[in-house]
Image (spheres, rainbow, N blue to C red):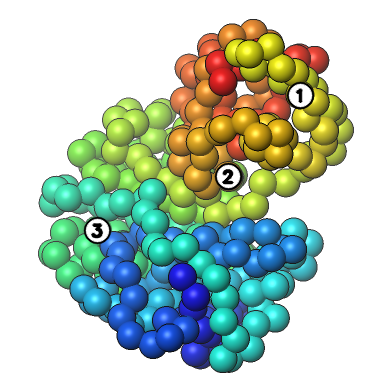
Amino acid sequence: MKLRLSETRDVTDRIRMMTLTAAEGGPLPAYSAGAHLDFDLGDAGTRSYSLVDFVPIPDAPDSYRIAVQAEPDGDGGSLAMHALSTGDVVEATAPKNSFELHVDNAPTMLIAGGIGVTPIISFATALRGRGTPFHFHYAARSRAVCAFADRLEDLFDDALTLWMDDTNQIDVAALLQNAPRDAHVYCCGPKGMIAAVKSAAEAAGHPSDRIRFELFETPQTEDGDQPFEVEINDGQVFTIPPGQTIIEVLEEAGVDVMYDCQRGDCGICQTDVLDGTPDHRDVVLSEDERTSGNVMQICVSRAKSARLKLDI
Ligand code: FES
């Protein structure tokens, strides 16, 4: 799709709200809470941004809203988005949703960290619209960098708790311990928060199929990353250098691979490991799956052994 940036508004020093309409005018494809758009930013690559809705989503939307946090140390995608001016046209996919809300009426705990709040706002709006009980926990480093705090307090009142690292830091272990065991739990935020929610939910005995999450962080190269080899079923061997993923190298060589998020949270690229030891960097596998070493997410994970043999 071609989308035109119709309005921008800075909501904090680094976070810019952007409204997009169809470049040629008219209605846009429908979507549900939790959906995102993938933007094609040319040399800056592809970036995903969740749609954010403070009011119920119409059946035939005439605009999309996203909130983009500038990451000066990132890969350039967010800065490319911030460089856009009103009236500019960008290319994006139609909305996709790999973070769907459940359909039953069980109580729901929403947990957001930083700019990961965007899909969680849409969830809170949708849950309130259908009368499902929920509580919305939103953690940020401080009130100054907490996007939409005043607006969310007005909208969600007692159903919202703001947690600030500098005054009242969120304790996810306590939240999960006190949540009903039939609650649905949704978390969107940085990797550390998702890992903490997953392990707290496991420790408190929540069924794993009630916990869903979306990572709001671009995968980073880690210090000390080394090249390693990947062997696939037809015997071809590829070298994966630091700074490139298995998916990137295989795709460049014309190997067909399935993937979506490329952050390690959707599970689509999961691949059987036939030999070698993966270095897991995803947030989707359970502890048992990690320990077994039999599967890995090839969009972010690397290798602890010199070579991996993968079922591709
Ligand atoms: S593409 Fe989503 S986990 Fe790999």
Residue 4: x %, y % from top left? 51, 84
Q: Residues within 10 Å of mark 2 (few under 14, many from 20)?
A: many
In the rendered image, which quarter is residue 54 located in? bottom left
Label of residue 238 in the image? 1
Mark 2 secondary-structure assignment:
loop
Would residue 188 appear left or right of 75 to someone viewing this image? left
Q: Is residue 267 left or right of residue 247?
A: left
Q: What is the distance, in whole Å, between disc 2 and disc 1 at their CAs?
A: 19 Å
The percent position of residue 229, horizontal first and vertical second, equals 77, 20
Return the residue nearer the eye: 177 or 288. Answer: 288
Please report whichever mark, 2 or 1, sits nearer to the chain's N-terminal start: 1
Q: Position of residue 17 (x, y in %)?
A: 52, 80
Type of amino acid at the residue the image marks with label 2: Gln
Answer with mark 2 or mark 3, whichever residue precedes in sequence.
3
Q: Quadrant of the C terminus?
A: top right
Hey, what amino acid is under mark 1? Phe
Q: Is mark 2 within 8 Å of ligand 1?
A: yes
Q: Residue at x 38, y 49 (%)?
A: 98
- Give the spatial CA distance, label 2 vs label 3: 30 Å
Tell me: residue 18, above or below residue 51.
Answer: below
Between marks 2 and 3 in the image, the one whose residue lies nearer the viewer: 2
Q: Are marks 2 and 3 in contact (CB under 8 Å)?
A: no
Going by the numbered disc 3, the residue's amino acid type is: Phe
The residue singled out by tag 3 in the image is 134
**Mark closest to the chain's N terminus, 3 or 1:** 3
Q: Which residue is the site of mark 2?
A: 262
Element carrying mark 3: strand
Residue sitting at 35 percent across and 40 percent down? 211
